[in-house]
Amino acid sequence: MRYLLRRALHALLLLFGVSLLAFMFAAMAPGNYLDEMRLNPQIAPETISALRAQYGMDRPFPVRYLRWLGSVLRGEWGFSFAYNRPVASLLVVRARNTLLLAATATALAWLLALPLGVWSAERAGHWPDRLVSAGSAALLVIPELVLALGLLILAVRSGWFPAGGLESLGSGSLSAGRKIADLARHLTLPVAALVLSSIPLLIRHVRAAVAEVLGSGFLWAAEAHGISRRRLLWRHALPAAANPLISLFGFSLGGLLSGSLIVEVVMSWPGLGPLLLEAILTRDLYVVIGCVLLSTLFLVGGNLAADLLLYWADPRIRWEGPEP
Amino acid sequence: MEPLLSVAGLVKQYVRTGPAGGSRGILTALDGVTFTLAAGRTLAVVGRSGSGKSTLALCIAGLERPTAGSILVEGRDMASLGATELRALRPRIQLVFQDPAASLNPRFTAEQLVAEPLQVQGRVPARERPGRVRLLMECVGLSAAMRSRTPGEFSGGQRQRLAIARALALEPRVLILDEALSALDCSVQAQIANLVAELQPALRLSCLFITHDLRMAGWLADEIAVMERGRIVEMGSSEAVVESPQHGVTQSLVAAARARGAAPPQAGR
Amino acid sequence: MRPAPGGSPRHRVFVWLVALAVLHALVVFAGVISPYAPEEQDRDHAYAPPTRIHWIDSRGGFHPRPFIRPWLPLEGGLGEFAEDPAQQIPLRFLVAGAPYRLLGVIPCRLHLFATEGARISLLGTDGYGRDQFSRLLYGGQISLLAGWLAAALALLGGTIIGTAAGFLGGWADDALMRVAELFLALPWLYLLFALRAFLPLAVSPLQAFFLVVGVIGAVGWARPARLVRGVVLSAKERDFVRAARGFGASEGYLLRRHVLPETASVLLTQAAILVPQYILAEVTLSFLGLGVPEPAPSWGNLLASLQQYSVLASYWWMCLPAVIMVPFFLGYLGLASALQAWTGPVKIAGGGSGSAE
């Protein structure tokens, strides 16, 4: 329990550090971004001076940071000058979409990587292993951007899948079942791009972890006792290989989030990625900070989930904590 | 006569760190070690692994700071010197490590290795160094023609000769051999031991011979100190310690030496 | 597991190096190989498909010297083209053409191939009628150089910080590694974008280039720093370092002569991993309009037009640059895994998260 508390505290400190880092970069940005906002006719001068006062734009860095921290605690996460509303209200919708995409892709990638990895570890050196290896090596060299573009071209040429977006026009009038089917159709391409780009590393690690367990010898004893090969692999080898894989799960989330940034923009999936890009181009800096912090939150959350899983899966950790 | 090296009440403690990063108690490697070494003499420190004898070697060579106690070299206390003064005193005491493959940088040539102490201390002008290196290599029985080889191209015994040549480059008064023979084959052990024994009177060198092998100690040293758990439990002349061991640890070491082979290597001193 | 030919690791490193050298030569000598300057426009032939190379004429006669037929805009067509059957323009090799500077210095006019009377575009043309083949080669110069420089910057920063942390130890080590952890905790593309966000957007291509290199390098130092620190920590305790300290070598000398050379193999492998990653980072930034802007060509802004639905749907040759980039990444991946096999295991994925300490 103490171990978990320590991990959680660590994660909290990390988030705090990241926010400070992001804020520091923002403070170093040349020019005052509110000045640019002043050119925007949609924002009244009174609003700007009110914001200026509220966020203490002319005040020193620590004051600004503290005010922003306060607005995070109030659930506002700063103010979007482009949208003229609190950042949090923007982030919630976008984060939900990104999470939907990332969670689906993660689940699918692991569901595919586990059997493929175990299969090729068991047949190490034979044709299934070589086939999987060659396939994953080929996928590994194709950059996410190229992969996403390729799939998009496929969609556009074939017309099988929508070329972007979250839902079809007028989907609001559809029945619940149709709505879900429509969403699934829109999810297919971005999820495919993410799965294809993240799966090679997962397969490699699963294969390596399982191969190490298979080579360690204790399974020979189990086999001698007449346990079936299939049961041996899934009930004995895989759980024994679980620890490094659970850590990998947390860490693979980071790669997936970075990947989803590109995929979302290319396939116009209304997640955090396009919001971040748009915020960068309009210099909406609180939104940028919000996006960065939220993506870190996801990553840290993923790692915490992995820790929790590890804690649950491996009784040794409850006593000692994982090896450093 | 004033002793060359005099160690008194030497204590070395390590703080053990647990996997969580916190301290998990204190490990006492040396617990009040006291002895003296006169010029030109050889003292063997014998003990089982973990008895603290290697920590002793590192402390005397100035590579570890003792927690308490004094190490007097020609009357100056190494334990209390600042970094700059310590560097000036270092050439007086040189250490030969157990594994020459690890103590010689594999990227260097033999010539660079032997010349390195001279270069670092800036004692010998650069143009005189090749001659000095040749002399040192011949001194330990290596042909000067081998000077452009890297450590990987030497045999184990040759590597240890090279390490000794390097240790002698600064003309030390005390040579510490920290298990310097243990990693070598039996016949090579004898060769290196003979080499040290031959060099000693010529260079007026004192030797601190650290080993777990009582047989080798009795054969090479004037005096033997037996260590156990960071303390010297028995000390005396070689003959006395080997012939009539008093302490239980010494007795078991004698038995171990007998079991390894009663006959001492060819060509005694 | 590795997409590599057989043989010893050393041999494989060599093979991949040769393959990469050939690929890079195409880009380095872009001036010679490409027929046109990358900014040269031909508005009459916007979005023209790749020029076809012919050996056989309409009467069935064989020509040892290949020829092309110019693209004619179709009457009433929406920017579509057809070959002009009346014309045969022979390909000429090693001829003088548009001036350029070889390696950025030597003024030169020699081109590997050219045509007279009509333009040849092996990979088609873009919306301004610019030759995609020339833009791809010249764009490679910018993208590859950006990747190399950014990797050099990240490795330099990582080496300095990692060495300082490992060698000084104590609170300096703690502080530096905490900061590194911060950088590693973020999804790195988000970090890259955020840092780019806080820098000016409207800048000249040259400024943008250095901005991109600086940003990627500034984001990337943490991982090499951690690896270098590990190597320095273990090297510090090696016997040969202790031996050198034992004969009175100063800390600076130990660092220079004994500790830093130990980091070479790790840095080499890291370079092979980071260079393609950073090339891709530049491509991504430029693709999204945050990197090197038009009219300078870069692999990223070459692909940027694919963000328009009409281009994606109608002009298939605009995707060719993406396909041609892949061998470069294959080369670096092969080199990295061969280097790893040669110099001993270093985790390919690296410590990516705060929990993987």
Image (cartoon, coloured by chain):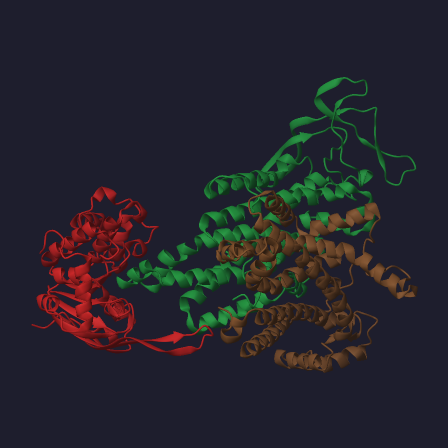
Chain colours: A brown, B red, C green
Furthest toward the left, the residue is B1
Q: In this view, does A207 lie to the left or right of A89?
A: left
Please tell me whether residue A160 is drawn above or below residue C100 in the rendered image: below
Rendered location of residue B124, percent (x, y): 21, 55
Q: Is residue C38 left or right of residue A162?
A: left
Rendered location of residue C279, percent (x, y): 61, 51
Q: Camera-side residue: A221 or B219?
A: A221
Q: Camera-side residue: C202 or C154?
A: C154
Please tell me whether residue A318 is drawn above or below residue A197 in the rendered image: below
At 88% from the left and 35% from the top, the residue drawn is C74
Q: Can residue C230 be seen in this view?
A: yes
Q: Quadrant of residue C43?
A: top right
Rendered location of residue C173, percent (x, y): 45, 70
Rendered location of residue C307, percent (x, y): 77, 52
Q: Camera-side residue: C221 or A196?
A: A196
Q: In which quarter of the image is residue A68?
A: bottom right
At 78% from the left and 63% from the top, the residue drawn is A270
Q: Is residue A290 left or right of residue A203?
A: right
